[in-house]
Image (spheres, rainbow, N blue to C red):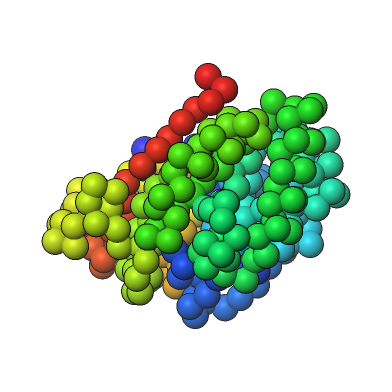
Amino acid sequence: MKKNLLELELTNTCNARCIMCPAGDMKRKKGFMKRETFELIIKKGIDYGIQRVRFCGLGEPLLHEDFCHFFSYVREHSHYITELITNGSLLSKEIVQRLIDHKIDFLSISFPSLVRENYERIMKGLVFNQVLERVLEAIHELKKVTDTHIKITSAVTDINCDEKTHLEHFWTQEGVDCIELYTPHNRGGHLTDMGSLNLPPPLGYSANTEIKKSLCPWPLRNFFMAWDGSVFLCCCDMEGECDVGNIYSDDFSEMEKKQESICFKQPNLCQRCSYQRAKIILKKEISI
Ligand code: SF4
Ligand code: SF4
């Protein structure tokens, strides 16, 4: 199946240690994507027919000092739809201006609580007031001059599960286009301490709920590329268990075949993963 979305891990380092994310335990070598790797990915992606690029992964994309260069490069060399997923803490004036100048199409910000203590328990390492100020400024500046689709996402845990209405009202008033609240999953089984994330029904799922063994749709639609050009099954494959290829030695069409063959075999990674029983608790498109 032809894939049209490229998920790029510009770095696998992060300035936060969120409770719903195993990134802090990653053993894979830490690093930052080189310009030559990025440019090769974009060029090969155009030849293959990629239509959308998403800056994401188990790492904060804005930690990369070349983020602005990468974003401009995509705009100048492709017709890709562009998307940034961020924790919002590094949305500086310079970065926001670049997002405006080259009009980012989709901006998704993880912001799980409006209560300082709750936020700082979930997004460990980030300072609530500082991030909120930056995120609000970014939303207001982008909304003045662009039609960027801005989404706030929130993992729902037992820390913030009574904030649903507050989150919905607050972000609606601030002018975002979409709010999405979801129950976290164990990310390929890498998140071993689900602690506060194990919500009972009706919000969460019962511990006895079977993990579905049906084919996961994620790798059938996307490629996930790590900072060094390695291609893995998805961003939950954080140690590179399912090696799909490498941008230096393989073309997208070869990797597409290999990825599907791995996916259909339902590797151990997917057997452990609870992605398919995670729930969207609220998805509200405000601007429609
Ligand atoms: S969820 Fe995002 S911000 Fe939080 S630790 Fe993981 S990569 Fe970093
Ligand atoms: S089931 Fe497999 S492919 Fe799907 S999200 Fe989990 S690890 Fe990734």
* Residue positioned 46% across, 39% down in the render: 165
Furthest residue toward top: 288
Query: Residue 150: horizontal and vertical position, in percent?
Result: 62, 36
- Tell me the quarter of the picture where residue 62 sits: bottom right
Decide if residue 32 is in sight here. yes
Horizontal side of 115 relative to 184 (left or right) equals right
Query: Residue 121: horizontal and vertical position, in percent?
Result: 52, 68
Decide if residue 243 is in sight here. no
Query: Residue 80: horizontal and vertical position, in percent?
Result: 64, 35
Query: Residue 19: horizontal and vertical position, in percent?
Result: 46, 68
For the image, the number of numbered tags is 0
Q: Which of 259 and 139 is in front in this view?
A: 139
* Residue positioned 57% across, 22% down in the render: 287
Horizontal side of 149 relative to 100 (left or right) equals left
Quadrant of image for the N terminus: top left
- Tell me the quarter of the picture where residue 100 sits: top right
* Residue positioned 80% across, 27% down in the render: 145
Q: Nearer the viewer, residue 253 or 285?
A: 285
* Residue positioned 69% across, 26% down in the render: 147
Answer above or below: position of 280 versus 111: above
Horizontal side of 272 relative to 102 (left or right) equals left
